[in-house]
Amino acid sequence: MEIWLEIRKDQESGTRRLVSEYGDRLFAAAVLLCRNDDDAEELVFRTLDQAVRKIGQYRPTSDFFNWLYTILLNFYRMGLRKKRIDCIALGTPQELPEPPAELPGESGDADGYASLRLAIQELNVPLREVVTMRYFLELSVDEISRKLSLPIGTVKSRLHKARTVLYAVLSKQEGD
Amino acid sequence: MMDEETDYLISSRVKACVAGKHLPATFADRLTKHLRHRRRMFRLKTMTVVVLLALVALGLLGSFSRSTCESDDRASLVAGNNTPGTEKNLSGWFFLGFFRECLRRGRTGKKKEDDPID
């Protein structure tokens, strides 16, 4: 049975299946967008909660994971807007928190990707969005431009900037 | 390096970078518990709204029927036949007639028995 049908039929078992089939992939995308794992987990929680409640709005003509990712991206942007409003209200500078330092025993330099992960987290939000969609979800430039409602030229320009930064990090890593 | 080759390299590294990321084992339980709680709250709110609407409907019914019953009561008292529109009273009053009477008493400051009979 298709997952959206199962969720409509039996919400609890459908939800568990949703988490097991799509949870980790969604979490990985959220980790690339957010700067820490806790925020990413919370973002995925809100996304799946919304997806289950609004399952009636899903149209089987589109890819299910892409639909989930659209919800995730909307919540991510709402969260950013709220942070900016809070910063303005409190009169604090609009800076995003620093990404946490790698904890010992975590997959730091042991897997060699810590510097790449940090490089992605240090990109600004527009670049991080295109990086996630292009390199993790493997969407084409056209699809990214449609999803983000941006001209194709803008998407290409952002990809070019992100590519330059990330390639430099990877080259340095290879050199080391 | 060609853009496509760079893209391929970056893509494989980015995926490897988050390959070890998994949701905690308790995530599914937490989500289902949250959804269950939300459903329960929704049902509670719906029932509250239905009960309130029913009370309002009874109140309106009581007001309309009461005025009809009052004229019937007076007519029957004058005629001395003591046959009020009992059926209408029961259907109209229900228990809200009592509250209405209390409100009326509160406004005029006197009991119903004190009203003069014409």
Image (cartoon, coloured by chain):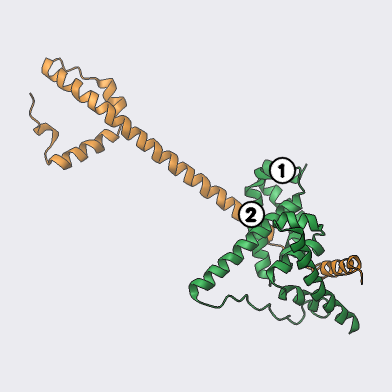
Q: Tell me residue A139's x, y (percent).
A: 81, 57
- Badge count: 2
**Vertical side of A29 occupied by A102: above or below:** below
Is residue A112 in view? no
Residues at marks 2 and 1 on the same chain = yes
Quarter of the image with the N terminus of chain A is: top right
Q: Tell me residue A70's x, y (percent).
A: 70, 55
The answer to whether B106 appears left or right of B29 in the picture is left
Extreme residue in the bottom direction: A176
Q: Tell me residue A68's x, y (percent).
A: 71, 54
Q: Amino acid at mark 2?
A: Asp
Quarter of the image with the C terminus of chain A is: bottom right
Give the color of chain A as drawn: green
**Vertical side of A160 occupied by B44: above or below:** above
Give the color of chain B as drawn: orange
Q: Disc 1: which chain?
A: A
Distance from disc 2 to disc 1, alpha carbons, whole Å, reads 18 Å
Q: Disc 2: which chain?
A: A
Mark 2: give few (<14), some (14-19) or many (20+) Cα within 10 Å: some
Q: Which residue is mark 1?
A: A59
Q: Residue at x 41, y 39 (%)?
A: B51
Is residue B28 in view? yes
Q: Which residue is mark 2?
A: A49
Quarter residue B107 falls in: top left
Determine whether the residue tagged by mark 1 lies in a helix, strand or loop.
loop
Q: Residue at x 65, y 68 (%)?
A: A39
Q: Amino acid at mark 1?
A: Arg
